[in-house]
Every structure is written in C-alpha cells, then in structure tokens.
Image: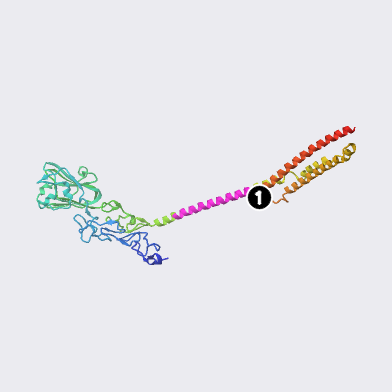
Amino acid sequence: MCENGTYGSGCHEICGHCIQGNNSCSTIDGHCKDGCQEGWKGEKCNIGCESGTYGPGCKDLCGNCLNGSNSCSTKDGKCIGGCLAGYKGDTCKLGIRNFALNKFAHQSSTVFYNGFQWTADKAVDGNDNGSNPAISRTCSATNLSLGNHTWEVDIGFQIMVKSIIVYGRTTEDDQLSGFQVFVGNNSNPWTSDPPVTKQQSSNHKHVFASINSACRFVSVVRWNQAILTLCEVVVEGECLDGVFSEFCNLTCGKCNEGRPCDKDSGTCPSGCDRGWKGTRCDMRLQETALTTDAIGGIVGAVIVVVVIIITLVIAVVKWKRRRAKTDQTIQMVAIDSPRKDNEKSETYLNIGKRVSEVDYSNVYANTNLDKSSTEFYQTLDDAAQNDASVYSVIKDTENPTKAKVCSSVDYAEQLLSIEKEMKSIEKKKNDLILTKKKLLNKLAKSESIAK
C-alpha cells in the first residue's frame, strides 16, 4: 500500500489539493473524497479553476469586479481592482450592498419632457448624479398634476434592510421636498406600514439609516404635490440570517452552535457543528460510515439468506433420503414375510401328500390297469414332490438372511420373478388337481366294473 500523499502503480503519483490536505487522497486512485481546496476541481483536485470561477470545486462565479467578471481571484473570488458602482465587499456581489440596483421599479405616472421619458427604472440604474440637466435625464419623474405621487422598487425577495439613500436633483429640491419612505413585505407598503425615519439630509442627498427591517418592497411617496423626481434610490442591506449568495437563496450549513454562516460565501467562521464538515459545513461526517454500514448490512443480510437457503436444501435432501430408506424397508418386509415359513412348507408338502396317499397297490390289485398306470401315478407323485422342492427354493430365496438386497430396483426384479414362478406353480397345481380328479373318476369306474 502507498504512503499517504501518494497513489497509483508504484506509488509515483502525488495527491492533488484535497480539502483535508495534500496527504488525504485515496492511495489507490488519488480521488479526494471530501472535495477540493479553493481554486481547484476534479476528482483528484488537480485542475485549476478557469477565469471567472473560484472557490472549492470552482463552483462560484466572480462578482461585479471593476475590471470585468473574469478578473477575480480563482481562489477566493476577490476583485483586486475594486467593484462596479453599487457593489461592495471583496467579491463585489455580496455583503452590505445595494439590492435595488437594476431591480423592477414602477411609479404612479411618468412625465415625458423634452423628448425624453423619465421612467421609474432611471432611479435604480446606478447613476445618482443629478447636477447637470443633461445627466438629470437619468432620473425618474411623475407628471405635473397635483395629488399623491408614488414610486416603488421590488427587491424580489426578503432582505435585511440596513439603510436607504434617496438622491434628488441638485437644482430642483422642490421636486422632492416632503417625501416619505416606506418598507414592507407587500406592494405599496405606504398603505399599511409606518414610514421610516430620516436621519440626515444635505442638498440633494437624503439618508435613512439604522432601519434593520426584513422587507421586500421600498416605496417613496410625496403627498399632495405636483411632481416626484428621483435620481437614484439605494437600498443597502444583506441576506437574512441562515441564507447566503447573491440572491440570498442558498441555505447555510450546520455552523457551530447554530450560528449564521457568512452571507457572502456561506462558510462558517465559528466552525462546524458536531457531526458536520466541509468549508460550508454541509457534509455529514457519518456519511461514509453510514454508507459502509449500509453496504455491510446488505451483504450480511444476503449471507444470512444464502445460509438459510443452503440449510433448507440440505434438510430437504436428508428428508428425501430418509424417506427413500423407509420405503425400501417397507418393500423388504412386504416381500420377505407374506406368510410364515412353516406355513409355506406345510402347504407345499400337502399338495404332494394328497396325491401320493393313494394306495397304488390296491388300485393295481383290484383293477386290470397295467403297470404303466402305476408308473403314471408315481410320476404324478414325483411331480408333486418336485413342486414342493420348487417352493422350497422360492422360500429360501425370500429369506432376508440369504437374499442380498442391493437396491429398490433389485427388489422389484426379484418380486416380479417370484410372482411369475408362483403363477407357474399355481397353474401346475391346478393341472395336478384336474389330473387327480380324472384319475379318481377312472378309478371309480374301474372299481365299478370289477364288481
């Protein structure tokens, strides 16, 4: 195995810029399991960020740098040359900044003067210079009729408003005098919320500071006047606690003790809460362990199932073998003991006796039968005796102590052979009985003739 900081065949490859240090990559393939350091990307964290991107894994885009969006540091996104107008902070996109810049604005009416439309969006274009009449065309203005004149900007989402700065025309202060500023979470907050307090005013610049209100809409209202002119409305604020990014739409990770993350980068200055890691504390420390445990659990479950299946198969095979042996034993009993041995001997011997008990000498003496008849009876008697000997052979074959049983197939063959022999003997027996009857009839006739 390779030493920490190296990997690959022969351990000649050097680890990249892993977030946990250059010695924390896999010693097998060099990948950085916890991610990359700022300014690097790729599985091995050995590819630098392209221009216009920065941060861990190069996932963040440069802000509104003065020298262009591709001029920030690929490591931390800092704009070395400063920010464009309306942006603040090292990255020129977050922190305390003007959330009203280039956002949607509308007003109660619009004046058309000298061939120029003084529309509401001119008050959020980033140009607050109203001293020159030509430049003043970057201002918004309502018409000249008397009444309540209103102007409003929609930030698009809730922010923590810190301060509001309203710029008017330097030469036309009367077009802004007596105005009020309202903030709220519903359009036209001047209809339901109280106005914010003005802190200071000098010439054409009016500052409303220390507002510290979570809101989305900002309205400027002039009551019962002839015109409302605004050259720029700056709404300075920051994301609410718990969210970050340019549009305050990303949720903070698990910072230590539930503290808010940096509203610019999402990092946790106080470190991560227990069980969490990463620059934004959004990765669980137990993630790898849990994954390993889950895999181990699955493998263990599969092994248990396989063992159970194997056990069941073995049990079934043993049961079948045991049953087969039992069946063979039953077949052996059925073959070996249909009758008692002494009963077989008696039966078979009696067949011979019944025929041979005839008094051949009397028959010969009392009849005119010739010697050949006597020889016939003797042959019959011998046949009966032969039958008995045949049955004795069968009896001996059926004796389990003498017959060697090899398998159920052997038993079946022996049984068929025995059945055939028994049928043959039964036929001979019937033939002998019939012959006996015929001889007895002849004998009776002979005795009758003799009388």
Let me know if residue 303 is in the magenta part: yes
Rendered location of residue 98, percent (x, y): 21, 53
Tell how many labels: 1
> In the rendered view, does 130 fall on the left or right side of 342?
left
Rendered location of residue 273, percent (x, y): 35, 57
Tell me the element at label 1. Answer: loop
> In the rendered view, does 351 fall on the left or right side of 168?
right
Which region of the structure is painted magenta? Answer: 295-324
- Judged by its main secondary structure, the magenta piece is helix
- Please state which of residues 8 and 38 is positioned toward the viewer in this rendering: 8
Residue 286 visible, this angle: no
Rendered location of residue 263, percent (x, y): 27, 55
- According to the picture, the residue beneath numbered tag 1 turns out to be 407
Q: From the viewer's perspective, is residue 84 above or below residue 440?
A: below
| Amino acid type at mark 1 | Ser
- Please state which of residues 400 and 7 is positioned toward the viewer in this rendering: 400
Q: Residues within 10 Å of mark 1 (few under 14, many from 20)?
A: few
